[in-house]
Amino acid sequence: MDKNSFNFELESKEIPFDVIKEAISIIDIASRNYVSANIVEYNGNIDSYIRRSSAASIAEVMNSKKEIDIQTDLGEIDYQEFKYEVYLTVKGLDNYKYRMFFVRYGSISYPVTIVLNRDIAEKSLGKTQTKYFISNEDNLRDMLNEIINSSYIFSIVQSLINEALRRENKDN
């Protein structure tokens, strides 16, 4: 290992939360705050999963062996996981939420995992893939710009603005 082999120029200066918050803020501005883009902490699963039955027979419990994996004590320790949901809300629809995607990253900010709404993946990115592993800030910004500036997101935001205006006119 040569001391001159490491690169000390920071490639990704901002954590994913800040990059996403900045990128989605354009929705609030462009919609004149009729539609708000939000990024908030999320505690649930962000990946599809299989729900297992909690019912186990006594025989299964008595005969079960528990493997202890020593590898769990090696590698990263005190790892933190950050999970967020990114969604749109609409002025006048207090309980409405349009979830765009989930975000997950760890103590080390990159790579970041993005799990997109299936319609957004297909109609904004033209892909059936919904889960992405983004390696750095530039790639994250590029992906967010492609999504936010897509005609699909434009049509969603426009329909949400229209609904907010309908409700506003109804109340007046």
Image (cartoon, helix red, strand yellow):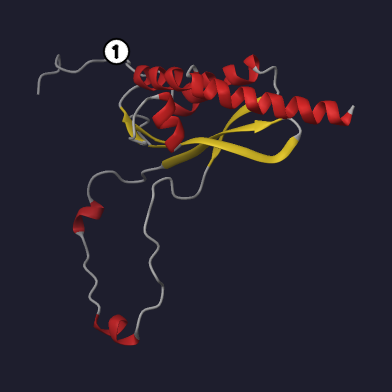
How many neighbours does mark 1 have within 10 angstroms: few (below 14), some (14-19), or many (20 or more)? few
**Quadrant of the rendered image containing residue 55:** bottom left
Mark 1 element type: loop
Query: Looking at the image, which residue is at 50% across and 24% down?
Result: 152
Viewport quadrant of the C terminus: top right
Is residue 112 visible in this depiction of the protein? yes
- In terms of depth relative to the viewer, which is nearer, 19 or 75? 19
Viewport quadrant of the N terminus: top left
- In terms of depth relative to the viewer, which is nearer, 93 or 68? 93
Query: Looking at the image, which residue is at 24% across and 83% down?
Result: 63
- In terms of depth relative to the viewer, which is nearer, 62 or 46? 46
**Residue 67's spot in the image, x, y percent?**
21, 68
Three-letter residue code for mark 1: Glu
Is residue 111 visible in this depiction of the protein? no
Q: From this view, report whether residue 97 is shown above or below residue 34.
A: below
**Residue 25's spot in the image, x, y percent?**
58, 20
User: As drawn, which residue projects farthest toward the right?
Assistant: 172
Query: Looking at the image, which residue is at 58% across and 27% down?
Result: 156
**Residue 168's spot in the image, x, y percent?**
81, 27
Side (left or right) of 66 relative to 1: right
Per the image, the residue denoted by label 1 is 9
**Quadrant of the rendered image containing residue 92:** top right
Q: From this view, report whether residue 109 is shown above or below residue 31.
A: below
**Quadrant of the rendered image containing residue 52:** bottom left
User: As drawn, which residue projects farthest toward the bottom?
Assistant: 59
Query: Looking at the image, which residue is at 45% across and 39% down?
Result: 82
Side (left or right) of 75 relative to 40: left
**Residue 143's spot in the image, x, y percent?**
39, 21
- In terms of depth relative to the viewer, which is nearer, 81 or 94? 94
